[in-house]
Amino acid sequence: MTAELIHRLHFAFTITFHYLFPQLTMGLALLIVALKTVALKTGEEQWDRAARFWGRIFGINFVFGVVTGIPMEFEFGTNWAQFARVSGGVIGQPLAMEGVFSFFLESAFLGLFLYGEKRLSKTMHWFSSVMVFVGSWISGFFIIVTDAWMQHPVSYEMVNGHYEVLSFWQLLVNPWGLLQYMHNMTGAVVTGSFVMAATGAFYLLEGRLQNYGRIFLKVGVIAGVIASIAIIFPTGDLHGKYVAKNQPAAMAAMEGVFKSEAGTGIVLIGQPNEETGQIDNPIVINNVLSFLIYGTTSAEVKGLDQIPHDQWPTALPLLYYAYHIMAGLGTWFILLMAGSAFLLWRGKLHQTRWVLWALLLSFPLPYIANTAGWMTAELGRQPWLIYGLMRTNQGYSNTVSASNGLFTLLGFMGLYTLLGLLFTVLIYREISNGPEPKTAAIEPVHVGGAE
Amino acid sequence: MGFIWFWIVAVMIVGYVVLDGFDLGVGVLHLFLVRNEAERQASLRSIGPVWDGNEVWLLAGGGTLYFAFPWLYASAFSGFYLPLMIVLWLLILRGVSLELRNHIDVGVWRALLDGLFGGSSALLAIFFGAALANVIRGVPLRADGYFFLPLWTNWKPGPNPGILDWYTVIGGLVALVSLTLHGALWLSIKVSGDLEQRARRLVRPLWFVLLALTVVSLIATIAVRPQTLDNYYRYPFTFVVPVGVIAALVCIWLWNRNAQPVKAFLASCFYLFFMLAGACWGLYPTLLPATSNSGLDITLDRALSGPHALAVGLVWWVIGMALAVGYVVFVYSRFKGKSDLGEGSH
């Protein structure tokens, strides 16, 4: 095994595991604001309890997000030192800004939100939830800005062997970043709303805590249907077109287009075969891909045959499958959420048990779709670390040997397995306990001097 | 610009050590000072709302380092690969055991998590101290500006040292004792009753150990890297820093004895500040010395980022940190007072 591969796996594994947590917190932050807003307007206690319940789930996810997020910032230096040295003048900036502008905000107000309800006025407590939302979404923005520069470098110059930023503003408004941000944050809301709707469905199917089940279903399904539509149109559509324009190799590999032709069809199913340069056993709808990218069925989509082989994405089938899984799941999300929303509107959702089951069982799918989406983005960037500027095999830490890297990769795998188990236990307990206050997770303790 | 950014990074490090320092210290005390479940909960509640915010200083500091001195960040993080990975694992274990402890009410599990939380806190304190000592001592930088340090070699700070040698171990011990003392002072502010008294009493023996270690580490630093004193001789007024260290130590003693824990805690903050600032000033303008040949040192001028990035950075950094300090003050003021006497959390 080469050091390059180990360092790639190291980063890929730790960031994939990490992103299981922020995608929920970012989505949930918005939904908690919604719950708190209703609570503030109506003054109904159950909405406050619902918000507290999701606050506890948020808090657990936040802690796991923090502890798995710290390694990410370190790994730029530990595992990708050559890249860090070359790129720090550009992308170090948004990473530092994430810490300064987002994490302080988010952690401070989360502390207030979780621990300080009795020390704050109702409006201040609502405001804390808004600030947690703002903090987590700022955080997402700076990370996307960082990734966007690697995907689509803008406003840089090479000085003494490293990149410097020419215009900070251009870095922030990199069109790639803005499109990816909209798409990604919508994806986070999909995760948050599916998890909330699934929890609601769980309570209704179980026949307990039904008033909360109905709240969770309502909020989850309404947010879910909006987000599931927005994830495809406009955000996914716009982002896809931009990828096709700026990373034709990635788009060709994602869609499995080996030969350039006018009126390219879209491959629904089929296995890419790198050796023969074709899709095996495909089901294709003619002309659709040309239409989706260029708005006309006769346009030519650039195929892999027009791209030098050494610039093909290095893990082509994986990229193709990741993209198709994401797109396929996205279609299911719309079907399920639109159907659920219709039933909700007709007042039949709570009795339609098979739909409740479908909602319950679908909660892992947005996690898979978000992960597959990120794999699509990052595998599509290959073989480049900074698109068109620096190859991945030039960026890793050459002082850290493959076996040292493997040692810590295995360490992370073991530790994260343990973390995953603990996380499951914690979330299971919270959901079993439910939002009723008598089962609050942290009971007040009084230790007086008189003891 | 280089001077400013050097001290900005230093401020972030000081902020991290002063803030996360007390919750690390509370973690160490968790191993032996607290005696029953109620006391454990009280001591944990004193850091519950703030520890993850404190850890943010590490992230923000790391990000600032990456952005202002990319080469230093790249070289140091890959060179200190193994200890940094251990630090990451410890941070993960610590955060998770702390979080889990609030949710699990089975005695044996709690005991295990308490041990994990305390043990990882102690090891983190030692590693952070050793890390700083590594930077002061220097590393075997190669001509291309990179290095890779084994965990230990012959335990001597020569030209081919390891992460751990007698000098860096002293650094680790200074950190362990100073942060434990820092945590004890925090507890004496935040808890009441018997635990408060015990925390206050514990400060006294710790204080003597810390005084001895401070003197030993000072002498050891001058022995290992005599150039540390150059800046001080060049600008003699900066000898105010070691004087500040001693003054802060004296204040800790006096205010702790007079049961003025807030003042004693602030004095401890100043002790940490002066120790770190003194170390930074001893290095300046070197960022990471080379043990083999000082011509290979990573210096400020060589590692500094581009001028536009730094100019823009200065603007947002000032705004962002003003906001951050505002949040910190706000949160601490909301949670002020004894954490074990107020209302329940929820």
Image: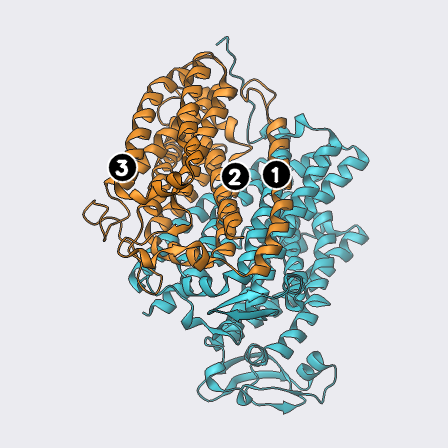
Chain colours: A cyan, B orange
As helix, strand or loop, the secondary structure at mark 3 comes to helix
User: Looking at the rendered structure, which numbered label has been put on residue B220?
Assistant: 3
Q: CA distance from mark 1 to mark 3?
A: 43 Å
> For the residue marked with disc 3, what is the amino acid?
Ala
Residue A414 in the figure: left or right of residue A293: left
| Total marks in image | 3
Q: Residues within 10 Å of mark 1 (few under 14, many from 20)?
A: many
Residue corresponding to mark 1: A110
* Foreground label between 1 and 3: 3
Q: Nearer the viewer, residue B11 or B329?
A: B11
Asked whether A181 or A370 is in front, the reply is: A181
Label 3 and label 2: CA atoms lie apart by 34 Å
Q: Chain of mark 2?
A: B
Q: Are marks 1 and 3 in contact (CB under 8 Å)?
A: no
Q: What residue is at 36 percent from the left and 27 percent from the top?
A: B31
**For the residues tagged 1 and 2, is the chain the same?**
no
Near mark 2 (Cα within 10 A), the count class, few <14, some 14-19 or many ≥20, is many
**For the view shown, which residue lies furthest in the bottom direction?**
A261
User: Residue B206 at what x, y percent from top left?
Assistant: 34, 22
